Amino acid sequence: MWHYLRYFGTHLLIALCAAGLLLGGGASWLGIAAGVVGWIGLDALSGRAGRLPEFRHPWILDLALHSFVPSVAALCVVFAWYLAPTDLLGIGRGVEALSGHPALAARAANDWLDHIGAVLSFGLAIALGAILTAHELMHRTQDRAAMFSARWLLAMAFNASLEVAHVFGHHRDVGTPRDPATARRGENVYAFWIRSSLGQVAQAWGIERERLRGKPALRALLLDNKVTRGFLRALLVAALFFVAAGAAGLAVFLAASLFNKLLLEALNYLEHYGLVREDGTPYALRHAWDTDRAFSQVVLINLPMHSEHHLDPKLHFEALRARPDETPILPWGYLAGLALTLLPPLWFRLVGPSLEDWDRRYASAGERALLGRRASA
């Protein structure tokens, strides 16, 4: 049963984040502290993953994914309470009655340092609980329940265009200069964060404009446009924060959304950093970095089997299999690698040997020539 239950594990991080917000003070840092010490720390110490078991009850795995919708929604309500000038929904009085903890007084005593901890904790919990789960579900384009959950998870993460840009853009263009979500050699993660974020919005608009070409303007711009509908859902979530906590609360929510977006783009960054693909050639397993660390695979819903995910994006995460003899492998887990990307000089130094190995063992002659032309440009 453990091999099912472990995919519910990120609920613990969400619960710790919510508890920290309710406790107030230094406890506001509880979510980010657990993420750094527990999640990233355990990933750094994690051993190599074994063979995945056979999942005879995939509905339990689907339940794990869909359960993040109410979990993330509850966290958003607690964060809105944390930011609100009033006792939103009587949450503070309820906590005091149940536990005796003076939640309202603790919230009133929060200072700017506590608020930073709250933003970082909420952003990390949203990145791992909402965006990663949405990433798995939004590839199930013919499953209405999966798309419903994915879209609302993305709305709560304030990431409206990912559904289109990732599924129909990144998977088509990965490794080529057309893909804003492929990090170039020598590009630091912060420059990539900006380029990729803006580029994916533009890419998504272009994909939808082409898909809806010839339809009446109202349908093309609003009714049938997935990007527009995504922005409307995200704006509804933002509006609820504004109603609950005013302009200041909305600004803090948007700041937390920028942080969760940075974490998402840091993952995008390390998944394909420095890898290239010639225009007109098919995707191959060599065009994504995998990791064989057990903790990364569980917490990130098998995302580190990234090469095979790109080979067949419609495969559910439990059907993915590692191919260590055919794919380039990073020497650390995805979560530990994410932390390294945030320190560009260290990242460039440590990833250099892996890039040299990729150039020698995996790159085609055309890709090596392409890298040589870029280096001399």
Image: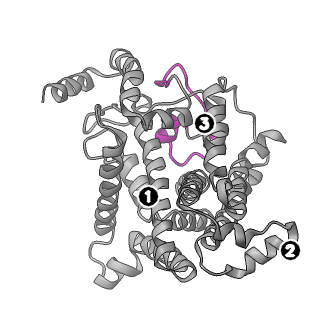
Which of the marked residues, 1 or 2, is nearer the chain's N terminus? 2
- Residue type for callout 2: Ala
Question: What main secondary structure does the magenta stretch of the protein show?
Answer: loop
Identify residue for label 1. 258
> Which of the 4 image quadrants contains residue 142?
bottom right
Identify residue for label 3. 40
- Residue type for callout 3: Ile
Magenta extent: 304-330
Badge 3 vs badge 2, beta-carbon distance below 8 Å: no
User: Under tag 2, what secondary structure?
Assistant: helix
Nearest the viewer among 92 and 355 is 92
The reply to whether residue 375 is in sight is yes
Where 336 sits versus 90, above or below?
above
Measured as percent of width and height from the top left, residue 188 is found at: 33, 38
Image quadrant occupied by the N terminus: top right
- Residue type for callout 1: Leu
Classed neighbour count for the residue bearing mark 3: other residues with Cα under 10 Å, few (<14), some (14–19), many (≥20): many
User: Under tag 1, what secondary structure?
Assistant: helix
Classed neighbour count for the residue bearing mark 2: other residues with Cα under 10 Å, few (<14), some (14–19), many (≥20): few
Identify residue for label 2. 97
